[in-house]
Image (tube, rainbow, N blue to C red):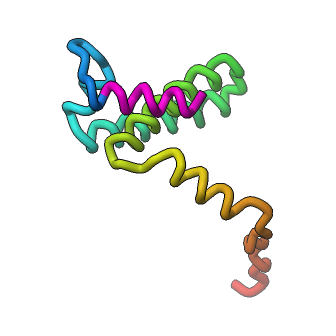
Amino acid sequence: MLDTLYHEALNRKRNPKEGSYTNYLYGKGLDKILKKVGEEATEVVIAAKNADKEEIANETADLLYHLAVLLVETGVSLEKIEDILQARQGKVSKTSDRREISDY
């Protein structure tokens, strides 16, 4: 599904369509696309806090769409992201809890 979404965004960039929201975003440029990604990410967080599964699904779909537009606009391929994720797979995280502060 992500592949389809990405390639549809790429196709719209290469073959603009009058009245297309995707082309509207491309026409407004990176700052507008970034603003939309930020808005949609925030809406996913709010949906999750509301524990509304339908809202989470809808807002996540919006976020994924806007991320696809962002990737196309910046020239980052899904293959690049897949390579990075595969390189990370199976690695042990270096995160740890902070030690407690006992002196004030």
Left or right: 104 as drawn, with respect to 12:
right
Range shown magenta = 1-12
Foreground residue among 82 and 101: 82
Left or right: 103 as drawn, with respect to 62:
right
| Chief secondary structure of the magenta portion | helix
Residue at image coords 77%, 67%: 91
Residue at far bottom of view: 103
Left or right: 67 as drawn, with respect to 84:
left
The quadrant in which the C terminus is found is bottom right
Specify the quadrant of the image occupied by residue 98. Answer: bottom right
Specify the quadrant of the image occupied by residue 33. Answer: top left
Residue at image coords 55%, 25%: 61
Residue at image coords 58%, 20%: 58
Residue at far top of view: 19
Foreground residue among 99 and 28: 28
Foreground residue among 61 and 79: 79
Please determine whether, in this image, residue 75 is positioned above or below residue 36. below
The quadrant in which the N terminus is found is top right
Please determine whether, in this image, residue 102 is positioned above or below residue 89. below
| Image location (x, y in percent) of residue 75 | 36, 48
User: Is residue 85 found inside the magenta-colored segment of the image?
Assistant: no
Residue at image coords 59%, 59%: 84
| Image location (x, y in percent) of residue 23 | 26, 25
| Image location (x, y in percent) of residue 101 | 75, 80
Q: How many marks?
A: 0
User: Is residue 6 found inside the magenta-colored segment of the image?
Assistant: yes
Left or right: 85 as drawn, with respect to 16:
right
